[in-house]
């Protein structure tokens, strides 16, 4: 084998997955068909759950240092108040995708990830032992890499998905949006948000002094997906919608997107897996796409590493599809709804008025915030505890080694069995998994922990926390421990116990 895992695509999803694998000691090569970074700004922010997973790995400060926190988000242009979310990081971080990619690439380099530029995937052959990835490079028309697994993180037009024969069903586009970073000398405002017009809507947002991001959306004008987007098309679209181009000039970047919503029929085909836009595309409403891909990577990374290291059976990889496919479908559904709410017309205007009037209710606001931020995700899990399957709150702790909160325990991307009541029986149970699960004895500083959509709950007695920060098992009492359920959870997620 040339490497354990080949990742196709050096965007945020591919880089995050590469970092997760390297933290677990897995050898990984990232191949990218581009010759170098384009510098295109693209996505514009990260939500609470993505900030939490970066915090879990101890790298969040790198992103906070160059981004701007904002107290608001939106659902189809209708503003939501994100302050007060049940998270240490409630506010969205405004940070351009180009900056996110640079920071992830720096982290990946620190971890020893190899990125090969100008490597285009043009063939995939898998067998019982591994995957042969056929590549076209600038130096050679034909090259190969042999790996145990291949993960396609290569975008909405994924070559890995196509070459692996994975279906991509969904709904086609009904509109065309153009996006560009340009100078607008005649615009007197720094911020125009989703101004509705008879033919669609437009926005102009100043991300940095001297230039704006302009987005125009026109309905019932569906462009050919292979047609290049041009500055003149963006200018003409803005004139049709706004009646002026505001003196637009000096484009840095122009692109096109629509409201097509598609999802891979399966996220795994043998030794080939998909993540990010290769697994799902949708209207970029609410800023969920980049976040969804990064969270795919964090769900998959530790599972794939466990299988590669021989600690867990290959069937563990099936849980990636089982957990993330429904999450992707939920995002497709809410972005379809948001696209419908942006369509011009008197009926939609009335619907927006009614929908907007509901946002004054805390429960409605909380529900939509949880949906957009992914804080409301609960994976299927055994047990009746409120936290089972949910992401663990970042509760304050007192530990012998000085860790002050739960997310500090997850920096190494290893499972943690957290004993909050000093029960010696836990040490005996986890002994068979001591090579892959960290037992930490601590005390919770708070008597109650905040859980999205559930309110405050009593601090548990013990938790088994997966490397992605989701709870695999929890106990509410310090009395009779259900050690059989704990052993089952350990074996289910982290493989069979060592035989001593």
Image (cartoon, rainbow, N blue to C red):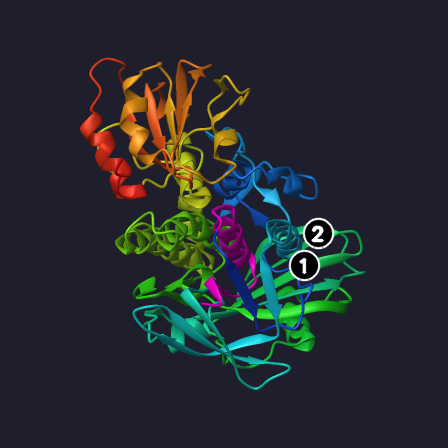
Q: Quadrant of residue 382?
A: top left
Residue 5 vertical placement versus 145 (above, below): above
Labels 1 and 2: the sequence-earlier one: 2
The magenta segment? 1-25
Question: How many C-alpha atoms fall within 10 Å of the one at disc 2: few (<14), some, or many (≥20)?
Answer: some
Decide which of 354, 85 is in the foreground and name it. 85
Q: Secondary structure at mark 2?
A: strand
Residue 66: image location, x then y, percent: 70, 44
Which mark, by number, is residue 286? Answer: none
Examine the structure image and report whether residue 13 is included in the region drawn in magenta: yes
Examine the structure image and report whether residue 434 is included in the region drawn in magenta: no
* Residue at image mark 1: 213
Residue 438, visible in the rendered structure: yes
Residue 404: image location, x then y, percent: 53, 21
- In the image, taking residue 134 as reference, residue 490 lies left or right, namely left
Q: CA distance from mark 1 to mark 2?
A: 7 Å
Decide which of 256, 375 is in the foreground and name it. 375
Do residues under tags 1 and 2 come within 8 Å of each other at their CB atoms? Answer: yes
Question: How many C-alpha atoms fall within 10 Å of the one at disc 1: few (<14), some, or many (≥20)?
Answer: many
Q: Quadrant of the C terminus?
A: top left
Q: Residue at x 60, y 84 (%)?
A: 140
- In the image, taking residue 371 as reference, residue 179 lies left or right, namely right
Which mark, by number, is residue 207? Answer: 2
Residue 382, visible in the rendered structure: no
Residue 450 vertical placement versus 31 (above, below): above
- In the image, taking residue 22 as reference, residue 230 lies left or right, namely right
Residue 136: image location, x then y, percent: 55, 81
Question: Residue at the bottom extreme?
Answer: 141
Residue 31: image location, x then y, percent: 55, 68
Decide which of 478, 258 is in the foreground and name it. 478
């Amino acid at each position: 084998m040339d490497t354990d895992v080949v990742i196709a695509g050096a965007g945020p999803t591919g880089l995050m997955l590469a970092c997760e694998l390297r933290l677990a000691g897995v050898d990984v090569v990232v191949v990218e068909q581009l010759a170098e970074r384009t510098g295109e700004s693209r996505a514009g922010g990260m939500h609470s759950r993505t900030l939490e997973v970066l915090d879990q790995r101890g790298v969040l400060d790198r992103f906070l240092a160059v981004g701007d926190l904002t107290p608001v988000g939106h659902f189809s242009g209708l503003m939501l108040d994100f302050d007060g979310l049940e998270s240490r990081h409630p506010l969205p971080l405004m940070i351009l995708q180009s900056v996110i990619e640079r920071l992830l690439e720096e982290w990946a380099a620190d971890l020893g990830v190899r990125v090969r530029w100008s490597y285009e995937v043009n063939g995939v052959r898998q067998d019982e032992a591994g995957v042969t990835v056929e590549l076209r490079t600038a130096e050679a028309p034909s090259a190969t890499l042999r790996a145990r697994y291949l993960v396609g993180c290569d975008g909405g037009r994924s070559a890995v998905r196509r070459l692996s024969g994975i279906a991509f069903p969904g709904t086609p586009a009904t509109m065309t949006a153009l996006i560009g970073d340009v100078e607008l000398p005649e615009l007197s405002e720094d911020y125009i948000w989703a101004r509705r017009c008879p033919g669609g809507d437009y926005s102009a947002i100043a991300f940095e002094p001297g230039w704006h991001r302009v987005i125009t959306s026109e309905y019932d004008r569906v462009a050919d997906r292979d047609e290049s987007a041009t500055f003149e098309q963006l200018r003409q679209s803005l004139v049709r919608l706004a009646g002026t181009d505001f003196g637009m000039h000096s484009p840095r970047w122009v692109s096109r997107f629509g409201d097509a919503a598609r999802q891979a029929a399966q996220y795994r085909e043998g030794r080939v897996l998909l993540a990010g836009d290769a697994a799902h595309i949708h209207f970029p409403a609410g800023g969920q796409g980049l976040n969804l891909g990064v969270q795919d990577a964090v769900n998959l990374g530790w599972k794939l590493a466990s299988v590669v290291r021989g600690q867990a059976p290959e069937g563990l990889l099936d849980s990636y599809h089982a957990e993330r496919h429904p999450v992707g479908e939920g995002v497709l559904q809410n972005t379809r709804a948001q696209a419908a709410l942006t369509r011009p017309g008197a009926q939609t205007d009335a619907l927006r008025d009614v929908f907007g009037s509901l946002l004054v209710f805390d429960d409605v606001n909380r529900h939509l915030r949880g949906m957009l931020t992914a804080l409301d995700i609960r994976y299927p899990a055994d047990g009746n505890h409120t936290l089972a399957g949910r992401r663990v709150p970042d509760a304050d702790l007192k530990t012998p080694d000085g860790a002050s909160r739960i997310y500090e325990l997850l920096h190494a991307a290893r499972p943690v069995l957290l004993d909050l009541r000093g029960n010696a029986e836990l040490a005996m149970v986890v002994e068979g998994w001591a090579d892959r699960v960290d037992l930490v004895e601590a005390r919770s500083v708070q008597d109650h922990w905040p859980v999205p959509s559930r309110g405050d709950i009593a601090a548990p007695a013990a938790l088994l926390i997966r490397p992605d920060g989701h709870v695999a098992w929890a106990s509410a009492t310090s009395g009779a421990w259900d050690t059989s359920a704990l052993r089952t959870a350990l074996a289910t997620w982290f493989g069979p116990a060592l035989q001593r």
